[in-house]
Image (spheres, rainbow, N blue to C red):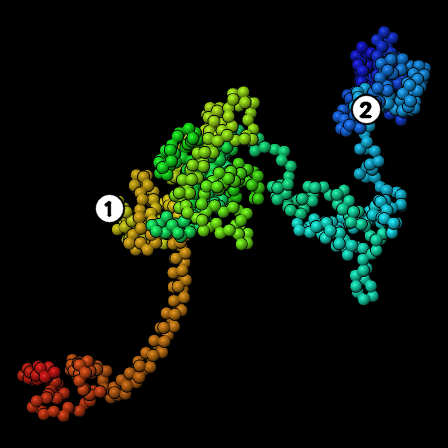
Amino acid sequence: MTVRVENLVVNDWLRNKAGNVAIVLHLDIHTDEVILIDTNDAKPLPRSVSARALSDYIKVVDNGATQATELLQTDKERAAAEFALNVIKPLVDDPSIYDRDSRGPLVRARAHECSISKKTVLSYLRRYWLGGMTVNALAPRFRDRGVLSKNSTVTSKVARGRRPDGNRYTPFDCTHSDEIEKIKKAIRKEYLSSDYKTIEDAYQACLQNYYSYRDKNGKRILLPAGECPTMRQFAYRLKKDFSITDIGTAKRGKKKFALTERAKLGSVMADCLGVGHIYEIDATIADVWLVSSAPDSRHKIIGKPTLYFVYDRWSRLIVGFHVTLESASWMAATQAILSILEPKEALCARYDVPYDAADWPADGILPAIFLADRGEMLSYASDNVTSLGPEVKNPPSDRADWKPIVEGGFRQQYARIRAVTAGYEPPQEALKRRARKYHLDASLTLAEFTKKILLCVIAHNREPIAHYPLTPQQLTRSIPPIPRELWNFEAPSRASSLRRCHYGIAKAALRPTNQATVKDSGIEFMGCLYSAPQLESAGWFVRARKRRFAVPISYDPRLCDSIEVHAKELGGTPVPVYLTPASEAYRGMSFGEVAAYLQMRKSILQEMVHHKRQVRSDFNDAADPISANARRLRKADSKGKARSARRQDTKEERERERRIERHRDAGADAPPVVSAEPMDLPEAVCPTESDFSTTNTPATNKLADLRRNLFHARQ
C-alpha cells in the first residue's frame, strides 16, 4: 500500500523495494517532505525525501530492535546518558539539524561549546535517532564492551590472564578446544559425578589424568606450572560452561535440587480453588517419648507415637488429626480421615476439653482432593476413599515441597508444645553422641499427649498466620488471617462444591473387605474362627457341615477380635461376629500377628513331618525283628499240623495265658514260659491241662466246667 505523509508519525518504520529500512525522524505536512534515517548504513545521517518518493516505501511494524527500551541499570550509565542528552538537546530541538548544509556548523559549534569532539556529538545524535529518540538510547552499555560472543574464537596465540609474580613462568594457554574439552571432561567425571568431591579434588584428578607423564620407574610426574592450567583457569571453565542448575542437579540429583535449591517462583495457592478443595495429609514420628498408662507402670517407657495431621490448603485450617502407637499405615491413615468426620463435641468430651463449634467449621466435610505422601495412601486400599467422593493424589517421591502446609505444620505444632512437654526430644539431638537422655524425662501417656495435641489444634485454628497471602477482597473486608475466619469467609462461595459425609458411612467404606468361609466349626477368616448367636439360630453352621460356603466380610486389620458379615439373607445389615473358644488365644492381636503365628505353626509342622518319619522308622527297626522271630517260631511249631486246627483250643490257651499274666502282674513266681508238662501238684488238688479238653458228651462238659471253676477259685 502506498505511503502517504498524512498517515505517518515520528518513529514509523518504512522499507523500500531493496529491503532497506528507514525511520521517520521529522514530518513537514506543508512541504510534503519527510526526514528519514537509514538503519542499514554504518554511519547514517538524516536525509530528506519528497512525498512522491514515498511510493517506493511500505510501512512495516517496528520490532523494537533499534529502540532502547532497556532501563538504565547503573549510576554511571545514567550519568552518561544525561550528559549526552544535555549535549545534543539544543541540536535536536532545532529542525535545521536535519538540513545537510546547516548540520555541520551546528555540530561544530556545540562540540566547541561542550569541549568535546565533533565525532562524539555525531555519535550521540545517531544513537538518539536510531534508538527511538529517548534518553535510554543514549545509555552506554558498559557491560557489553569487551565481551566476546558465545561462539567467538580466540585467534591470538598469546596466553591470556595475569602473569604470575616475578614472571616465574608463562601462563598456560587453555583457550584451545582440545584443552577446553580436557577440563570439561575432568569436571564431569570428577566433580559433577559425586556430591562430596570438591573442585580441588577435580582439579587434582585433571592434572593427574591429562597433564602428567610416567618416568622410567613408572612414577607419575605432574607437568610444571605453565604447561598445565591453573586452579583459577580450571574454576573459570567450570563457571563459564556449567550453570548453577547444571551443577546442582548433577551433584545432588534433580529431586533434591528441586526440593532444596530451586527457584521458588510459584505458589501452592495457584492450583487451589478455595477452602475444601485440597486437604494435605501426612504422618511423622512425634518427637515426644511416652510412658505406659497401666496402673503403677508410668515409669515404663513405650516409645514415640505416630502423629497424623490433615490441613486445608487454602485456609490452613487443621481439619483432622490422629495419634497412634501403630506405625504409619493405611489403617492409621483411615483413622486420620475419619477424624475429619468424627463429631467434635464427643471428641472434646472424651478428653475433657472445652468445646466450641466455631473452632471446627469444617467438621464432617470431605475435600475434592486428598494430597498424600507416596506411602500408605499409594496402596490399592486407598481406592476406598474415592467411593466417598474425594480423589487421592500423590506427589513425586522426595518432593515434600508439593505439600508444604502439612510438612510445615508439624514444625509449627512442635514449636508450640516443646517448652511445656516432658519427654520432648529435639530432632537434632536424636542421633547426637553423648546427648542428653530426653527419654528419661518421659511422663505423658498416650491419652495425655493426644489431649495436648487436641489443644494445639484448637489454638492453631484460632491463631493469626503472620505471612498468609490475603487477597484484595479479604483485605477490603478486613478478614483476619485466622484459619477458622478464612474458612468461614470462603465457604459460602464454595457451597456448591463442599459436601458433608456421615461418620458411619465413611467408616464402613474405608474398612477393607474380603471373603470368609463358613464351616461347621465357625466362620474362618485368616486362620481365625468366628461365630454369633444370630448366625447359629439361622442354622449356618449346621448347613456348612454338608457344604461350606463363602460370605463377604469387612474387618479392621489392627484387631482380630471381631469382623462384620455382609450377607443378603441378613437383610443387608452388617452382623458383627466374634472369636470362638477355638481361636480365643488370638484375642487382642492384629491379623498380621495372627498370620505370623500361623506361619510359625506351619514351619513347626513342616519340621515335624521329618521327625515323625524318623520316629516311625525307628519303631519299625525295633518291631520288625519281633514279628519276624514270631513268624519263624510259629512256622516251626506248625509243621505237620493243619492250619484249621490253630483255633481249636483258643479258649483254653487264653485261660492259661491269663493265669501266667496274673502271676506276673501280682509279682508271684510263675513259669517263665508255657510248658506242655503238667505242674508238679497233687492230681486230686490241681487240675492238669488234659482236664480242660472238651468232648462232645454233656457229662464230660459238666465235669470240665467244675474243674475249671475249681481252678479259678485256687487262683
State whether residue 69 is above or below residue 687. Answer: above
Q: Is residue 639 left or right of residue 619?
A: left
The amino acid type found where label 2 is placed reads: Ala
Tell me the residue at 56%/41% (across/down): 400
**Residue marked by disc 2:** 81
Q: Secondary structure at mark 1?
A: helix
Q: Earlier in the sequence, mark 1 or mark 2?
A: 2
Residue 164, image x and y in percent?
Answer: 85, 48
Closer-to-camera residue (339/75): 75
Q: Is residue 645 left or right of residue 94?
A: left
Q: Residues within 10 Å of mark 2 (few under 14, many from 20)?
A: many
Residue 686, image x and y in percent?
Answer: 10, 88
Q: Residues within 10 Å of mark 1 (few under 14, many from 20)?
A: few
**Residue marked by disc 1:** 537
Which part of the image, by quadrant, shows the N terminus? top right
- Dividing the picture into quadrants, the one containing residue 19 is top right
Tell me the residue at 39%/48% (across/down): 558
Front disc: 1 or 2:
2
Closer-to-camera residue (598/422): 422
Disc 1 to disc 2, how far (Cα)? 102 Å
Residue 344, image x and y in percent?
Answer: 38, 34
State whether residue 697 is above or below residue 189. Answer: below
